[in-house]
Each structure stands twice: as C-alpha cells, then as structure tokens.
Image (cartoon, rainbow, N blue to C red):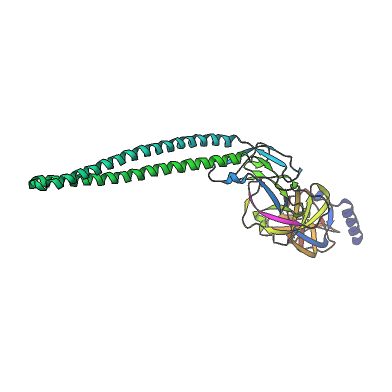
Amino acid sequence: MFSGILVVLIILLLIFKPWGEDSGKGEPVKVVRGTFETYISEVGELKARKSLDILIPAIAFRRELDIWQMKILDIVEEGKIVKKGDHVATLDPTDIEEEMDDNEKKLDDYTNRLETAKLDSSLTLSAARDAIQKAKDAVLDKEIKVQQSVYESRAVQRQAKLELEQAQRSYVRSKRELEQRRRKLKTTIVRYEQKVEKYQHRKDLYMQLRSQLDIKSPADGMIVYGNGYDGKIKVGSHVGRWAPLIATLPDLSTLMSEVYVKEVNIAKISLGDKVRIKIDAFPDRKFIGEVTKIANIGQEIPGEYQNGFKVQVTLAPYHVELLPGMTTANEIITGTWENVLMIPKSTVFADDSVRYVMKVSALGAEKTVVLIGGENEEFFMINSGLEEGDAVLNDSSKEIK
C-alpha cells in the first residue's frame, strides 16, 4: 500500500515538475566533460608591422623655422594604390608665406642696418685717424720746441717738456680711442652680418619648404592614413613636427592584429599565448594567431577613458586579402584544461560567497554547493559538487555575480 502511494507521488512529481516554473528556474542542462579555456576578449585592428611612412618635408623639422603645424588641403583616397612619385597630399602654404613675409621684413631691416654701420664705421674711423695724425704732428712740434729751449731759462725748458709730455699722452690716447672704436664698430658690423646671414638662411629654407608642399609617394604601395593632432588624417587635418605622419605604405605581408588590453587583464597574458581571431570583413572565416609583443608601458586606450597595454598578435598564414584598418575580435587564450567538468554560467547562483546549483533528481531540484575552478564568458569549470551527466536547472535571465 505504502509503496503504491510512493510510486504515485513520483509520477505526479515528474508530470508537474515542481522545479520548473514553480521554482523560477528554466529547463535542466547536463554537466559535460571536455576542454575548458579561459580567454580575454578584446577588439583590435589590423596593422602592418613594417611600413614606409609618408611624412611632412624633412626641412620642416629645422629649428630655424617657426612652422609648427600645417593644414592638409587635399589627400588621395585611403586604400588607393600609388606608384613612386605619385601625388599623395598638398599642404597649405598660408602659414609659411606669412612667416616668409615677416622674415623678409627683418632681412631688409638688418641689411639696411649693416650698410649704415659700414658707412658709419668708415666715417668714424677716418675722423679718428685724422685726429691721430694731428696728435702726432703736435708731438713733433713739441719735440722741436724742447730742442730749441736748451738756450732758454730752466723755467722755459720745463714748460716745453711739460707740453711735450701732454702732446705724447694725447697721441697715445687718440690711438687707444681709435682701437676701441674699431673694435666696437667691428662688433656691431659682425652682429648685423650674423643677423643678415640668419634671415637670409631662413629665407632660403622657407623657399625650399614652400616648394615641397606637394607630397609625393616615396615608393609603390597602398595609402593608409596616419594620425595627426586631431585624430585620423583627413582634409583639414593638421600635421607638424610633433605629429609628422601623413600616411603609410604598409607591407601587406606583415599584417598583425593590434589590441589594447585593459590594465586588469594584462597580467594574465604572456608571450606565445594563442589567439582566436574574427575579422568583420570575413564573418564566416576563423583566423588564429599568437601574442608576439606586449608593451611595457600602458597608455590611454583610443576612444576610451581608461588605460591599457598595446599587444601585438601575429597571424598564422592566411589565404584571403586582408587590409590594414580592418576590425578584429580577439580571444586571447590564457589557460587550457583537458577533461574537466563544465556547466553554463547561467546555471550557477550565488548566496554571499557560496556558489550553488539546483541539481535535478527524481524527487525534484535540490540546492547543491559547487566549487568553481575557473570561468570564461560562457562556462564555469567545476572542481567538486557535481558529476558528469548530472542535470542542473538553467536560468538564462539570471545575472551571475
């Protein structure tokens, strides 16, 4: 009698499934055994490890020039195939021409000053030489008077000697003043000559720069825009000595995925880690790669308000036409475990620091504590609490903490 009632209860439990809608949980799923991976998912971009940079004219880096940035008036379409010597971009000459006008005014000013200084030097030194000659003649005159005074009284002789000494001192002073004036005038002339040379040199440099604003391709290749002061290069962008890159000619055989990994995850990544890569342009294809370089210093992630570390992922040989700038989705595999138990993350619930599942049995669903060994975006690895083939309730709407 009792055994018959128990059978009926079990049948009723299986029919009405009190662990289903009444428990708030979904359909049960099985605990499976297999390969478990932990990975970090980050978006990246295809870039070439080797490329030829197309920069502003080399002369624009000269310190003598007060040109810090130049606007791009036109640039060829990104992705265009160019030949060596083909037109790539044109830089705005406005700022250069303004600096040239200002430089020309200074050149004229110091040229005039130099000519005036040379003329003043000639006149001044001529007058000084005349004064020296007069002082020398005065010395000779006083020497004659001293010679003639030998027949005069001692007082007259003494007076003649005093006058000779004064004339000699005046002569020496005149020569010293001439030398001082010569040095002063020479210094002034040299200073003006240096100014004229400086501004003439600048004029030549500005003219050279002005003639090089039509940027040509240094080799055959495909144009990929660089980054300037205000983001990716376009018409109206500014380039200069602090951001000289206009475009690049990438070596398409050296494409890699450049990824920024957030600070919290960078310690989990090592050189040689395998990477699964998806490329938006080829949604049905899968690519693989390997971490080959990790930056030592973090920097702000472009477009985000947080720091990250630049990671380079080298792609395995591929047989499609990949291009720089294509967006990549990268799964960097940080750990692999074989023959372990796994369950979907939506089947695990949290009660403070305790993780548990609702394990299904013939009598219903019971709360079972589990020990989590690892996790990825989809699964938990189970170290204890469950066996392969066990059924646990699934709740896809449950947010796992």
Q: In the current view of this chain or complex, which residue is farthest to the left?
A: 153
Q: Is residue 179 left or right of residue 302?
A: left
Position in image of residue 387 (x %, y %): 81, 64
Position in image of residue 16 (x %, y %): 87, 51
Q: Nearer the viewer, residue 215 or 197?
A: 197
Q: Which residues are magenta?
A: 300-319
Q: Residue at 7% of width from left, 46% of height from top?
A: 153
Q: Nearer the viewer, residue 62 or 313?
A: 62
Q: Is residue 314 magenta?
A: yes
Q: Residue at 59% of width from left, 45% of height from top?
A: 59
As displayed, is residue 117 above or below residue 310? above
Q: Nearer the viewer, residue 136 or 371?
A: 136
Q: On the image, which quarter does residue 392 sit in? A: bottom right
Q: Residue at 55% of width from left, 36% of height from top?
A: 100
Position in image of residue 162 (x %, y %): 15, 46
Residue 371 makes an appearance in the image: no
Q: Residue at 15% of width from left, 47% of height from top?
A: 147
Position in image of residue 268 (x %, y %): 68, 60
Q: Is residue 148 left or right of residue 325?
A: left
Residue 127 makes an appearance in the image: yes
As displayed, is residue 205 above or below residue 336? above
